[in-house]
Image: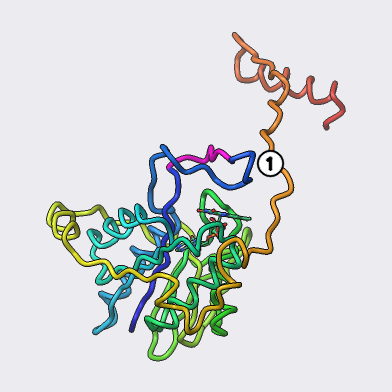
Amino acid sequence: MKIIVCIKQVPDTNEVEIDPQTNTLIRTGIPVIINPDDKSAVEAALELREKIAGSTVTVVCMGPPQAEMALREALSMGCDEAVLVSGRKFGGSDTLATSTILSATLKKIGYDLILTGRQAIDGDTAQVGPQIAEHLGIPQVSYVEEITPEKDSIIVMRQYEDRYHKIRVKLPCLLTAIQDLARPRYMTVKGVSSAETREIRRMDYDDLSDILDAAAVGLKGSPTQVVRTYTKEPKAQGAILKGLTPDEAVDAIMARLHEEHLI
Ligand SMILES: Cc1cc2nc3c(=O)[nH]c(=O)nc-3n(C[C@H](O)[C@H](O)[C@H](O)COP(=O)(O)OP(=O)(O)OC[C@H]3O[C@@H](n4cnc5c(N)ncnc54)[C@H](O)[C@@H]3O)c2cc1C
């Protein structure tokens, strides 16, 4: 089984700054990590490989040249292959253009099972995984917490707020992973040193141009218009109750909530 994991390199913070001129993310000078959901997806893929003889795990990342770091980290966890999709023509891509480029890449390299994270901690839209499945015309299940392989299908547990769905999906398909899917393994020293010299396959617009329309990528292919970005107003100063027993504190909070007509 050819398992693909789409990983995104994201800033190691939830405090993403936005460029007020271009309304795009400012990425310079911020430490970067593999998006947490994606790292769980990598781990789940490696565990599946151990269960299904002859399987391979390929990680794919679209981003600037420095996104190679994320791919090397995935290689050092044990992935078999890494693909960096990068190029000037791809700059400024919104989620639609990103998923268009990633799905073209996946058509080129082949796949049986595609894993993405549920959502990236910077863009936060949770759109790219489902959009890739739509472009490829394959079934998708989001919020996946457990994967059990069968012969030509897989059984997944989809997490809801108050329940689970157990779903059988035919391959090829796409799953979006939540962090509960798997706890990422640590990189080994041997893994890290061998990943440093492993080859990373690079793909740019020219490698995909036979199946990718130039008007569908980058800013031209991005229908999303960011109208305005702004910093949230700080909330009003809270009250701190000091020197009370737990019971007195509960009474004081209840009294305050009544006073404000909140209960
Ligand atoms: C108008 C506009 C302009 C933008 N311009 C830029 C820009 O110039 N430069 C820039 O860096 N960003 C830019 N962005 C942000 C960019 O579109 C998003 O970061 C990207 O499309 C992914 O969306 P998301 O972060 O919401 O991912 P989500 O949809 O939340 O991600 C879900 C999952 O999809 C997969 N995934 C998402 N992105 C990638 C990726 N790149 N490679 C591999 N897998 C991926 C991961 O598995 C991830 O967990 C722009 C966005 C908009 C709206």
**Element class at badge 1:** loop
The C terminus: image quadrant: top right
Residue closer to the observer: 155 or 35: 35
Q: In the image, what residue type sits under mark 1?
A: Thr
Residues drawn in magenta: 12-18
Residue closer to the observer: 26 or 152: 26
The N terminus: image quadrant: bottom left
Residue matched to label 1: 229
Around disc 1, counting alpha carbons within 10 Å, would you say few (fewer than 14), some (14 to 19), or many (20 or more)?
few
158 lies above or below 133: above
**239 in magenta:** no
Q: Residue at x 61, y 67 (%)?
A: 96
Main secondary structure found in the magenta portion:
loop
**13 in magenta:** yes
Image quadrant of residue 110? bottom left
In the drawing, does residue 56 fall left or right of residue 40?
Answer: left
x and y percentages locating residue 135 in the rendered image: 57, 79
Q: Residue at x 61, y 64 (%)?
A: 163
Q: Residue at x 19, y 60 (%)?
A: 195
x and y percentages locating residue 202 in the rendered image: 33, 68
217 lies above or below 260: below
Residue closer to the observer: 238 or 193: 193
**Residue closest to the far top:** 243
